[in-house]
Structures are given as C-alpha cells and as structure tokens.
Amino acid sequence: MAKVLVLYYSTYGHLETMANAVAEGARAAGATVDVKRVPETAPDEVAKAAHFKLDQAAPVATIADLEHYDAIIVGAPTRFGRIASQMAAFLDQAGGLWFRGALNGKVGAAFTSTATQHGGQETTLFSIITNLLHFGMVIVGLPYSHQGQMSMSEIVGGAPYGATTLAAGDGSRQPSEIDLAGARHQGELVAKTAAKLFG
C-alpha cells in the first residue's frame, strides 16, 4: 500500500480545502495518506491583521518527514506567479535530503490557487514541480482524463500540470465542485502511480 503525503501551505483556507480533496482521492485509490502543512513564516501580528486562517487542523510537517513517503503532493498558492515563500522556505531546507538522494524515484505532484484566472497558476505549478524534479521525483500532473478542466460553462481551475482553484481577489470564491473533482482525481492518480512503483 502506497504511503502518500499531502503537503500544503494555505493562507486563507482555499488550499486547505484542496489538500483535503487531494487526500480523499488518494485514499479512494487505497493509499495511506497524511495531510500536513508547512509552518507559517509571517509574523503573528501580520498574519492576524491580514486575517490568515491560522486554525488549520493539519499538523505542521518537518523536513525529516518527507523521506518516509512514497509520494508527496505539494500545494501552495501563487505569489506573483511563483510559489509562496512559506512553501519555498520549507523546501529550501531539504538540501540534506537532496544531497543523499532520499527522494529519488518517489512520486511528486503539485496543486495551487490564484486570485484570478490569469494570476500565474501554471507558472506556480512549474515552480513547485521544478523543486520536485531537482529532488529526483517522478511527476504526475492532472491529465485531461479530468474533463472538468475543459469546461467553458463557468470559471474553473485545473491544468495538465496540476489541480488548481481560483480564490478571487478578496478570497470570496471557494473551490468549486469541478476544482475539487480535479484535486481528487490527481490524488487518485498519484496514489495509483506510487502503488505501481512501490507496491
């Protein structure tokens, strides 16, 4: 049975919701799944003044956790078209794992959230995937087997590179059912890929 980590950072809760959907998909495929978040790096007074969602249920991950999983699915919001600094700071601490090749051959995937349709979803996914490739991981995206990402009847997230959602500039839009279905589908594909590689 594959062991999967859904590792995320969420400022306002959108990616917390997506992370739980990713985990649902991986569990449905038979994987053992843990959902963990990375530490908040913004000063407490700044986070509270900006109404960050600080009461998230997921435990905080450590770098040492990463090598104990067959697959790691990383979710982080965009910051000006790239990975949020909280996730970047966390992954930057993984030099020892990289040096030892501890993540080589494991399965990796990415998901994200942006404020707008053209707010950097694909570039953010690639900035996450770049880290995972440097770690030697095998990447699983979100293929068009999730046909919801092709919908033109409403604004939807999703890209061949990973599940996505849109939050709106004021954070008022929550992940749609299509967005969540994409997250579940990606989680399922990652779990199935890890099971093929690791049993």
Image (cartoon, rainbow, N blue to C red):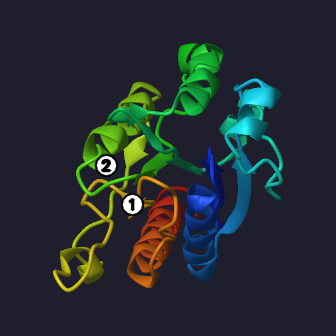
Q: Is 168 above or below relative to 114?
A: below
CB of mark 2 within 8 Å of CB of mark 1?
yes
Residue at 33% of width from left, 66% of height from top?
157
Asked whether, in this view, residue 84 is left or right of residue 51, the answer is left
Q: Nearer the viewer, residue 14 or 171?
A: 171
Q: CA distance from mark 2 to mark 1?
A: 7 Å
10 Å crowding of disc 1: few (<14), some (14-19), many (20+): many
Q: Quadrant of residue 116?
A: bottom left
Q: Nearer the viewer, residue 45 or 100?
A: 45
In this rendering, is residue 51 above or below 194?
above
Image quarter in which the N terminus is found = bottom right
- Residue 34 vs 128, above or below: the answer is below
Looking at the rendered structure, the kind of residue marked 1 is Thr
Residue assigned mark 2:
121
The mark nearer the N terminus, 2 or 1, is 2
Going by the image, does 9 lie left or right of 190?
Answer: right
Using the rendered view, name the quadrant where residue 165 is placed: bottom left
The percent position of residue 188, horizontal first and vertical second, equals 49, 73
The residue sitting at 35% across, 31% down in the picture is 130
Judge by depth and name the residue closer to the eye, 151 or 183.
Answer: 151
Q: Is residue 55 left or right of residue 149?
A: right
Q: Going 31% across and 49% down the picture, which residue do you hit?
A: 121
Q: Is the C terminus in the top left, top right, bottom left or bottom right quadrant?
A: bottom right
SS under mark 2: helix
Q: Foreground residue, 145 or 16?
A: 16
The residue singled out by tag 1 in the image is 164
For badge 2, the amino acid type reads Gln
Count of numbered tags: 2
Vertical relation: 182 (above or below) 112: below
Identify the image quadrant of residue 145: bottom left
Image point (25%, 81%), residue name = 154
Q: Return the mark for residue 100.
A: none
